[in-house]
Structures are given as C-alpha cells and as structure tokens.
Image: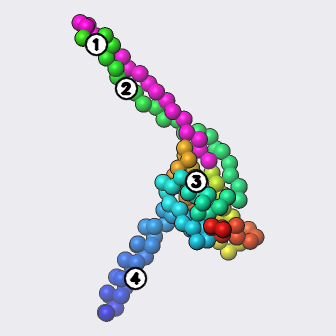
Amino acid sequence: MGKSAAVLAVAALFVLVAGEEGQAFRCGSGLVNVGDSTGKVLVECGPPTSKEVVGAATKGKKSQARQGKGKRGAKDQETYRQSSRKVERWFYNCGEHDFLYVLTFTGGVLEREETEGYGRGASACRGRR
C-alpha cells in the first residue's frame, strides 16, 4: 500500500468515526441510540445519576372537515389540535476520566445525546447489572 493510499484509508476511517459522534451513547456494556425509548435506556444503562424535567414540547396540527355533507352550500371547517410531550434531561456521570453525558428525551424518546464537560469521582456508567 502506497503512502497516499494509507493516508486516504486513515482519513476515510476518521470520517466514519466522526460521523457516528452524537448518534449513540455507550454505558458499560450497554449501547443506546437516538430514537430509543426511556425504557430501553434504563435496561441498557441503568438509572441516571440525576434527571430533570425541562418542560413540554407542544405540537399543533390543522385539519379540515366538511360540514353538511351532501347539502348545497356545505362549508369546510378548519380545526386545530394540539398535543404536548414532556421533555426530560437525564445525566450520566461517567467519572473523572470520562464525560458527563446528557440524554434529552421528548415524549419518552431519546432525541439527543451530548456532553457537559468531564464527570467527577467514580464512574456511574456501568451499564446492565
């Protein structure tokens, strides 16, 4: 393998690994991904170090219904329905040599995984027990 081919292979590997960042959270032997439920995260990672409710995500939808079907002069009536889903942040302290991971759930579904600096003390990220 030539020098340029080796550099290209390393660059391709870096792009693949960097593309996965933020997509999954490894806790001990457990692994969870965006789109997983709170139940799966609890099974794979155990209870979080702490959690907080940060509010609710509200979603609305308009729809139209025909009033007076089959009658002359029937009109469309527009309706609006709203739904609200709880937003929570779960914190996993993975110790002083790792990060404090924050998992954000909307309506019980993992939406985002991010870090907030380094953890402290012993790791609480042991995964399944």
Way the structure is coloured: rainbow
The reply to whether the magenta stretch includes residue 83 is yes
Query: Which residue in the protein does label 2 denote?
Result: 63
Tell whether label 3 touches label 4 (CB within 8 Å).
no
Tell me which numbered mark, 1 or 4, is placed earlier along the sequence. Answer: 4
CA gap, disc 2 and disc 4: 52 Å
Quick one: 105 or 19, which is closer to the camera? 105
| Disc 2 versus disc 1: nearer the observer | 1
Q: Is residue 60 left or right of residue 78?
A: right
Observer able to see residue 10: yes
Tell whether label 4 touches label 1 (CB within 8 Å).
no
Q: In x, y percent, where is residue 119?
A: 69, 67
CA gap, disc 2 and disc 3: 33 Å
Q: Quadrant of residue 75?
A: top left
CA gap, disc 1 and disc 4: 66 Å
Tell me which numbered mark, 3 or 1, is placed earlier along the sequence. Answer: 3
Q: In x, y percent, where is residue 23?
A: 48, 62
Tell whether label 1 touches label 2 (CB within 8 Å).
no
Going by the numbered disc 2, the residue's amino acid type is Ser
The reply to whether the magenta stretch includes residue 90 is no
CA gap, disc 2 and disc 1: 16 Å
Query: Which residue in the protein does label 4 denote?
Result: 10
When the figure is inspected, residue 29 is found, relative to residue 111, above or below; the finding is: below
In the rendered structure, find residue 45 and report the number of the disc placed on it.
none
Q: Residue at x 34, y 91 (%)?
A: 3
Tag 3's secondary structure?
Answer: helix
Q: Which residues are magenta?
A: 71-88
Query: Which residue in the protein does label 3 denote?
Result: 39
